[in-house]
Image: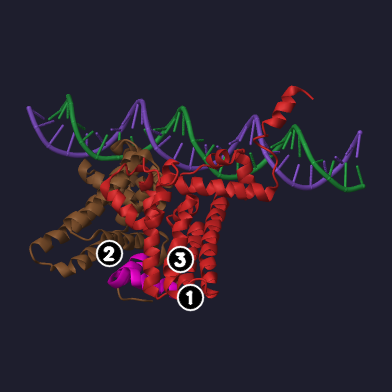
Chain colours: A brown, B red, C purple, D green
DNA sequence: GCCTCTGGTTATTGATTGATTACTACCGAG
DNA sequence: CTCGGTAGTAATCAATCAATAACCAGAGGC
């Protein structure tokens, strides 16, 4: 054995074997992030592979095609979103949350999702891809699914649902243009973000720069 | 003169020479539409060329690079948006529009822009491209420009501006997922679109299917 | 009638990129 | 121990695409 081989053995195998299901979820997580940042067409399977620390062909083979991977990504994001909402609804149904707080709590649940930016951004990238026959179909269905959930399960008046969704789309857009990462103290940007992100502002700004919460530099 | 030549003269030359400035604007218009539908990375210069009825290299040579073309497209969209808003503000300053109607009129001006879908959609595609160093920079600056216009020139309270922008982003998202073209009578979709597009609903649905306004098929 | 500027075109190329193929390594069961 | 299934990789390919180069045509001044 050469010393090189010895070294390789000593330096901890960064890539270890992993059960397929676990690897799959790991890829989906990284794909969410990359797709969310660069969009469907703007992302290469190679970029996702690098983010996940594996080879490009493995990404493709595990999901069949890039398109199928993307659909799974937005399906997963949609799932996480509805789970978060339904959890709030469950707490409401058990009396843990009074009716006059339900709206605020659902809003809070949405804003909390900002922390995993991949979820909201990849969803938004799915929405913007509405012209695509496959992706668009899922995007529309997903959007309406959320609409119905808020109207029929949370029993919000239709226009309140509309307003709720509008606020969500503004949040998505502000994240998409990268305002928290590039506002550089701009007064208008700060004001708009304060109004839009509310109590979560700190978290949003820290996620951008990797500073601990509370540190305004 | 041969009869062929005569024919050609009669059948209007589909491609005639055109002053550069005019050709430029024509390309920008078609590029808005295609970029707006398929996104920056998802659009090829060839698709834009075909839409504009010219060759692909001509598109590239006229704008230098695909990226520069895209930046010009969102710059143009931003321009049309601010012109529309400032026209309302001008009418307000001359007393043609009372103060208590200003918000509704600005909203109307935005919704009116739906008719040229390329404008709103290409802008949105610019927003979603926020990670790009060149495009993102322009997208952020443009968004904040609109924010300041509404706050400092229309004198809206900050939270009303936020709410106004949120409504706009919802409209953009509904158009992006292609809901007006693919709702197929879905009750929830109809309700949401009615609330979001208001009086412009007819126009939106007709632009989708090329039916004259009023015809609900 | 020639010349040149403007408004185009065709042909081509070098890089990317999603996908396929064929191979290797590890691990647990019998 | 070996055999098969699972978890991967390296090598390669066929398309696609933005960009460049080289060329062509009409119109108008001189």
Q: Which residues are magenta?
A: A185-212
Query: Is C10 placed above or below B53 here?
Result: above
The image quadrant where one finds the C terminus of chain B is top left
Residue B172 is situated, as x and y percent measured from the top left of the image, at: 40, 55
The residue to which callout 3 is attached is B106
Image quadrant where one finds the N terminus of chain B? top right
Residue indicated by mark 2: A111
Which residue is at a point 77% across and 23% down the rendered structure image?
B2
Q: Compare residues B123 and B6 and report the one nearer the observer.
A: B6
Q: Main secondary structure of the magenta part?
A: helix
Discs 1/3, front: 3
- Residue B26 at x, y = what percent? 60, 47
Instruction: Name above or below for residue B160 compared with residue A91.
Output: below
Q: Residues within 10 Å of mark 1 (few under 14, many from 20)?
A: few
Q: Is residue A169 a member of the stretch shown in magenta?
A: no
Check the residue under mark 3 and report the chain it is in.
B
Horizontal side of A80 relative to B202 (left or right) equals: left
Q: From the image, tell me which residue sits under label 1.
A: B152
Closer to the chain start, of discs 1 and 3, is: 3
* Chain under callout 1: B
Give the percent coordinates (x, y) of residue C10.
Answer: 65, 30
Judge if badges 2 and 1 mark residues of a common chain: no
Q: Residue at x 36, y 52 (%)?
A: B174
Number of numbered discs overlaid on the protein picture: 3
Of circles 2 and 1, the one toward us is 1
Residue B158 occupies which quadrant of the picture?
bottom left
């Amino acid at each position: 054995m050469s010393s090189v081989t010895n070294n390789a053995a000593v330096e901890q195998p960064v890539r270890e074997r992993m059960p397929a299901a676990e690897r799959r979820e790991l890829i989906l997580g990284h794909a969410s992030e990359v797709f969310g940042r660069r969009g469907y067409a703007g992302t290469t399977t190679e970029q996702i592979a690098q983010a996940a620390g594996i080879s490009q062909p493995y990404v493709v083979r595990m999901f069949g095609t890039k398109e199928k991977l993307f659909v799974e990504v937005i399906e997963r994001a949609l799932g996480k979103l509805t789970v978060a909402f339904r959890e709030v609804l469950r707490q409401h149904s058990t009396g843990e949350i009074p009716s006059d707080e339900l709206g605020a709590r659902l809003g809070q649940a949405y804003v909390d999702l900002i922390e995993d930016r991949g979820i909201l951004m990849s969803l938004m990238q799915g929405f913007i891809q509405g012209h695509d026959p496959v992706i668009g179909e899922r995007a529309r269905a997903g959007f309406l699914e959320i609409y119905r959930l808020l109207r029929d399960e949370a029993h919000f008046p239709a226009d309140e649902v509309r307003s709720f969704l509008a606020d969500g789309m503004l949040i998505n857009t502000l994240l998409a243009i990268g305002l928290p990462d590039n506002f550089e103290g701009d007064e208008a940007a700060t004001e708009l973000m304060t109004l839009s992100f509310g109590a979560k502002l700190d978290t949003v700004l820290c996620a951008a720069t990797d500073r601990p919460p509370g540190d305004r530099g």
